[in-house]
Image (cartoon, rainbow, N blue to C red):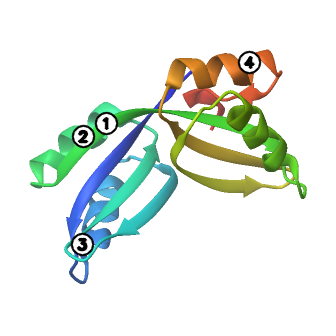
């Protein structure tokens, strides 16, 4: 099972991240997870939100460049080495991770993965008994 992630492309200037999160908040859209990456000229804000379609609509209405991407969100124990085991499963099957980010809640960690081959990645995770989350699980 995959979930949709938003990527919002932002100029590197003060207040742009706040413009995004304010827009989402004013429209009743909750952010479940996010990651910010930057280059010299722009940043990429990656988000998992409560309502993807509405978020795309309201952000585009505010002239943000927004893209939706399928990603995998998995859950593992929030203990040392748990993620390493899962990543080893993927490495053994030559699954390349383009990027990932994580957040923890108590005894569980949730990891968002963008693999080069989403179907193969899901197959490996499911075969190994890993817990793959759906949108409603977040």
Residue 95: which quarter of the image? top right
- Cβ–Cβ below 8 Å for labels 4 and 2? no
Instruction: From the top left corner, tell me how far across and down residue 38 is, in percent.
Output: 34, 70
Mark 2 → mark 1, Cα distance in angstroms: 8 Å
In terms of secondary structure, where does tag 1 sit? strand
- Viewer-nearest residue: 96 or 5: 96
- Picture layout, residue 93 above or below residue 123: below
Mark 2 → mark 3, Cα distance in angstroms: 16 Å
In terms of secondary structure, where does tag 4 sit? helix
Instruction: Please tell me how crowded label 1 is: few (under 14), some (14-19), or many (20+) other residues with Cα within 10 Å.
Output: some
Image-based side of 121 in relation to 65, left or right: right
To which residue does mark 2 refer?
56
To which residue does mark 4 refer?
126
**Quadrant for the C terminus in the image:** top right
- Cβ–Cβ below 8 Å for labels 2 and 3? no
Ranked by sequence position, the earlier of labels 1 and 3 is 3
Mark 3 → mark 4, Cα distance in angstroms: 39 Å
Ranked by sequence position, the earlier of labels 4 and 2 is 2
- Picture layout, residue 38 above or below residue 96: below
To which residue does mark 1 refer?
68
Mark 4 → mark 1, Cα distance in angstroms: 24 Å
- Cβ–Cβ below 8 Å for labels 2 and 1? yes
């Amino acid at each position: 099972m995959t979930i949709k992630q938003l990527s919002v492309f932002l100029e590197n200037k003060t207040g742009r991240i706040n413009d995004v999160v304010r827009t989402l908040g004013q429209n009743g859209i909750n952010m479940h997870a996010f990651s910010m990456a930057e280059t010299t000229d722009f940043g990429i804000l990656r988000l998992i939100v409560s309502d993807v379609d509405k978020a795309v609509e309201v952000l585009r209405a505010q002239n943000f460049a927004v893209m939706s991407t399928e990603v995998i969100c998995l859950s593992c124990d929030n203990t040392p080495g748990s993620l390493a085991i899962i990543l080893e499963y993927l490495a053994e099957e030559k699954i390349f991770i383009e990027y990932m980010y994580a957040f923890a809640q108590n005894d569980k960690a949730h990891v968002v993965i963008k693999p080069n081959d989403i179907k193969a990645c899901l197959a490996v995770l499911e075969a190994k008994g890993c817990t793959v989350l759906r949108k409603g699980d977040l």
